[in-house]
Image (cartoon, rainbow, N blue to C red):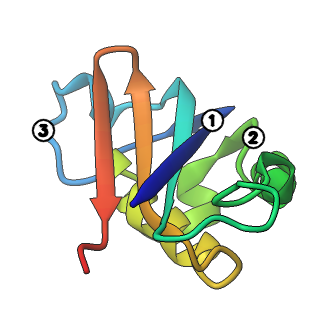
């Protein structure tokens, strides 16, 4: 099995509902997010790629047009935790990336959430 990944970055704000008033994430705050998409394939194309990284340019375009420097609560319609964002972005990109098996969202250099489909 061949596996590849590519990272994308964006900055956005959010407020997490359901937390106590004294929890810092219950207030408006932002992150410099890192989105990593993970692809896998049993076979390579005629060049030797799982997928050409340039074939993922539409991911950056989606991020730039829909998420970057936005308030995620206004965009998503759900509580924008890292876990929910990972699943949301998996669902957005899976129809265009059949090799996609996981999406990871990092809010900080020490934390991340992964949504993965296990075959």
Residue in the picture at 79% in, 53% down: 52
SS label for mark 2:
loop
Q: Residue 103 at x, y = what percent?
A: 44, 55
- Say few, some or many: other residues with alpha carbon within 10 Å of mark 3 (under 14 / 14 to 19 / 20 or more): few
**Residue holding disc 1:** 12
Give the total of numbered labels. Answer: 3
Q: CA distance from mark 2 to mark 1?
A: 6 Å
Assign the C terminus to one quadrant of the image: bottom left
> Disc 3 vs disc 2: which is toward the camera?
2
Which residue occupies the foreground of this view, 72 or 65? 65
Which residue occupies the foreground of this view, 31 or 109? 109
Q: CA distance from mark 3 to mark 2?
A: 27 Å
Residue in the picture at 63% in, 64% down: 44
Q: Are marks 1 and 3 in contact (CB under 8 Å)?
A: no
Q: Are marks 2 and 1 in contact (CB under 8 Å)?
A: yes
SS label for mark 1:
strand
Residue in the picture at 63% in, 60% down: 50
* Residue 14 is at least partly visible in this image: yes
SS label for mark 3:
loop
Q: CA distance from mark 1 to mark 3?
A: 22 Å
Q: Which mark is residue 20?
A: 3
Task: Say above or below: 119 vs 50.
Answer: below
Q: Which mark is residue 68?
A: 2
């Amino acid at each position: 099995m061949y596996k590849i990944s590519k990272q994308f970055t964006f900055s956005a704000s959010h407020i997490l509902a359901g937390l106590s008033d004294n929890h810092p994430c219950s207030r408006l705050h932002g992150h410099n997010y890192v989105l990593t998409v993970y692809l896998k394939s049993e076979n390579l194309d005629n060049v030797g790629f799982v997928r050409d990284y340039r074939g993922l340019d539409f991911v950056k375009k989606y991020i730039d047009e829909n998420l970057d420097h936005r308030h995620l609560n206004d965009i998503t319609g759900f509580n924008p935790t890292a876990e929910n964002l990972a699943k949301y972005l998996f669902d957005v990109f899976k129809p265009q990336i059949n090799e996609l098996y996981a999406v990871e969202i990092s809010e900080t250099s020490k934390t991340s959430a992964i949504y993965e489909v296990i075959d």
